[in-house]
Image: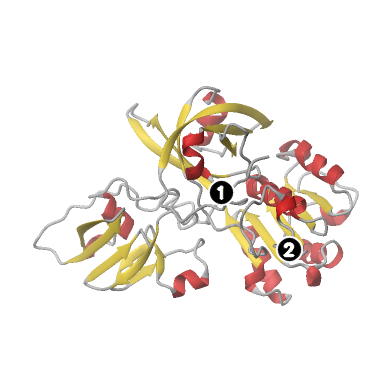
């Protein structure tokens, strides 16, 4: 198996990739594999746990084409083939009312082409000393300290977790991985066979705990919805909390926040907890302000926003009464400004404030050290000074 390099620092950019496989996972979820040609392999190097954004145009209610972007976690460990090509695999679960996910589950086929953004995201293990060649365990000797890892995932939250689990278990024969995976019923479990295979391959080091909210399990602690009481039971009887080196939490806002709060109460340091949200818990603002029209009148008070992108400077005025985000303003003069979810979750629109001040409405993507260095999510950032300068290239 060829070497997969650590992704270099790069700005997110879209490339057209062909669909090489569409595989049904459950009645409402598919796995999609994209072929990455050798000439683009460097643009699609990634670490387990990262995501890509997919972009296409679909007709809106009036039949007019509308651009849609949706982010999906990569569900396979990195690998490169003998001819220099590679692949990106994502899982797409149909959401109630989700235009993109419904279309993908019913219409997406082998041979189709979609715009795929280069991998992004920080939901990756921080346990390594060397973040390179993760698909070559034999070359990792001495670069990883043996560890104990736990993931709590719900529904499609398994997508990045299975890639992380596969990689860490293969990286060191001393590593242990516990997975608590919550679903409504057995028929809803994504990657059921793959998880069983992982258990067969690492019977002494991989523990799999299915929690089903609408089906009775033999163990009462694994039956029913994960609420505060059940989580305490799981932590008390199933998971070795005091021995865990790193936690991975992925799923809806309510579950992830419950787990974070409960682990904090048990004395688990925040730096040991990695988390990713699939929803923010604020359905009234699913896409932030992207595309919100703003009329600029020179007679109005306004903020002066300057930004650097690909070495080029841009500037735009934003009326103070409009309360628009920096991203929304920047898109009015540069449509290639990077973004994906626009809900404060993915981090694609990250930039560094180099002059002026801003306030952020939501932040579920940036780490404390990034905030301390002046990074913001421009989809959530609003100017609080007369002029603001941000840099997307830093």
Is 377 placed above or below 384 here?
above
Q: Residue drawn 54% across and 23% down? A: 109
Q: Residue drawn 47% across and 64% down? A: 363
Query: SS of the residue at dot 1?
Result: loop
Residue located beneath label 2 in the image: 142
* x, y percent for residue 183: 72, 46
Foreground residue among 379 and 334: 334
Foreground residue among 89 and 305: 89
Foreground residue among 175 and 288: 175
Q: Quadrant of residue 180?
A: bottom right
Q: Is residue 26 visible?
A: no
Q: Residue drawn 83% across and 66% down? A: 240
- How crowded is the residue under tag 1: few (<14 C-alpha within 10 Å), some, or many (20+)? many
In the rendered image, the quadrant that contains the N terminus is top right
- Chain-order first, disc 2 or disc 1: 1
How far apart marks 2 and 1 lie (CA) works out to 22 Å
- How crowded is the residue under tag 2: few (<14 C-alpha within 10 Å), some, or many (20+)? few
* x, y percent for residue 362: 45, 63
Q: Residue drawn 36% across and 59% down? A: 393
Q: Is 356 left, or right, of 32 in this rendering?
A: left
Residue located beneath label 1 in the image: 46
| Residue at the left extreme of this rendering | 299
């Amino acid at each position: 198996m060829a070497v997969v390099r650590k992704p270099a620092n790069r700005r997110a950019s879209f490339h057209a990739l062909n669909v090489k496989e569409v595989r049904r996972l459950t009645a409402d979820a598919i796995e999609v594999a994209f072929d990455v040609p050798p000439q683009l392999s460097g643009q699609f190097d990634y670490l387990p746990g990262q995501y890509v954004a997919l972009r296409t145009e679909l007709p809106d209610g009036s039949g007019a084409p509308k651009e849609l972007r949706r982010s999906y976690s990569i569900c396979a460990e990195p690998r490169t083939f003998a001819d220099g090509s590679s692949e990106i695999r994502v899982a797409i679960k149909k959401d109630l009312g989700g235009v993109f996910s419904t279309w993908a589950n019913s219409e997406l086929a082998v041979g189709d082409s979609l715009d795929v953004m280069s991998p992004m995201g920080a939901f990756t293990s921080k346990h390594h000393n060397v973040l390179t060649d993760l698909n070559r365990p034999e070359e990792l000797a001495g670069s990883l300290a043996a560890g104990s890892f736990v993931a709590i995932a719900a529904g499609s939250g398994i997508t990045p977790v299975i890639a992380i689990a596969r990689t860490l278990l293969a990286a060191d024969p001393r590593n242990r991985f516990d997975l608590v995976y919550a679903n409504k019923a057995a028929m809803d479990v994504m990657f059921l066979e793959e998880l069983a295979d992982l258990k067969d391959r690492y019977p002494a080091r991989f523990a799999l705990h299915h929690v089903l909210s609408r089906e009775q399990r033999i163990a009462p602690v694994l039956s029913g919805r994960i609420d505060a009481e059940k989580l305490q039971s799981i932590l008390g009887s199933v998971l070795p909390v005091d021995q865990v080196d790193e936690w991975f939490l992925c799923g809806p806002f309510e579950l992830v926040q419950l787990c974070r709060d409960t682990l904090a109460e048990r004395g688990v340091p925040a730096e040991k907890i990695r988390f990713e949200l699939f929803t923010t818990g604020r359905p009234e603002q699913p896409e932030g302000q992207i595309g919100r029209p703003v009329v600029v009148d020179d007679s109005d008070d306004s903020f002066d926003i300057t930004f650097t992108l690909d070495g080029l400077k841009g500037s735009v005025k934003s009326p103070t009464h409009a309360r628009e985000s920096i991203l929304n303003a920047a898109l009015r003069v540069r449509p290639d400004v990077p973004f994906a979810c626009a809900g404060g979750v993915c981090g694609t629109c990250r930039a560094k404030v180099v002059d002026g001040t801003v306030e952020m409405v939501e932040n579920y993507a940036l780490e404390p050290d990034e905030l301390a260095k002046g990074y913001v999510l421009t989809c959530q950032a609003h100017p609080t000074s007369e002029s603001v300068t941000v840099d997307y290239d830093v």
